[in-house]
Amino acid sequence: MIVSVVYPGAVTHALDLEARARAALLDAWCVCDYCVPEPDVRAVACRVALRDAVVVLDARGPVAWRGRVSVARLDMRSGADCLLGQLYGDYGSGLRALYGDDLDELYGHRENAVASLAFTSTFPRDLWLPVLAGYAP
């Protein structure tokens, strides 16, 4: 039997951790150990960036984008085989397709750039797998 116990302040702690993660992402250029050094904050930051990236792709990405990404080929370190590379030909073209030609606008408004961190080469590939499960070839 599994028993779940919620200690006093658990919800507050979880919300605080997500707020700290989002704040860390606003100052980060990726989700590596250097940019987001606290492991617990980095784990939540990755989930936040992934969630935001899925929202962006659902709103602005190609129709049925999940089915267009090959999990077998998915390599976040490759400009052609990363998620945006597979959808748009290369990483840069994908950023421009999602955020417009003015990338200074994207990076000038860091809150808009949080989702883009899930597309970077340091983002853990394995976090994309549940999002693509059942869709990707």
Image (cartoon, helix red, strand yellow):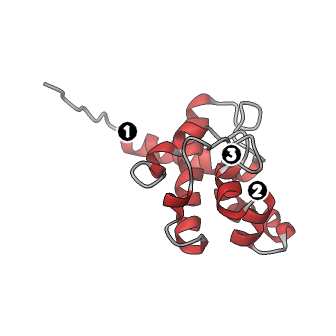
Residue position for label 1: 10
Badge 3: how crowded within 10 Å, few (<14), some, or many (20+)?
many
Q: Residue at x 64, y 30 (%)?
A: 38
Of callouts 3 and 2, the N-terminal one: 3
Q: Is residue 104 above or below residue 21?
A: below
Q: Nearer the viewer, mark 3 or mark 2?
A: 2
Please tell me which residue lies in front, 108 or 123.
Answer: 123
Residue at 62% over, 51% down: 22
Front position in the image: 60 or 65: 65
Q: Is residue 121 left or right of residue 17?
A: right
Q: What is the quadrant of residue 69 in the picture?
A: bottom right
Element at label 2:
helix
Q: Residue at x 69, y 70 (%)?
A: 98
SS type, badge 1: helix
Instruction: Find out whether the residues at labels 3 and 2 contact each other: C-beta distance under 8 Å.
Output: no
Work out whether mark 1 precedes mark 3 in sequence or the reverse, and give the earlier one.
1
Tag 2: amino acid: Tyr
Image coordinates for residue 75, horizontal then vertical, percent? 67, 41
Q: Earlier in the sequence, mark 2 or mark 1?
A: 1
On the question of residue 58 being in view, the answer is yes
Select label 2 or label 1 by which is in front. Answer: 2
Residue behind mark 3: 24
Instruction: Give the residue at mark 2.
Output: 91
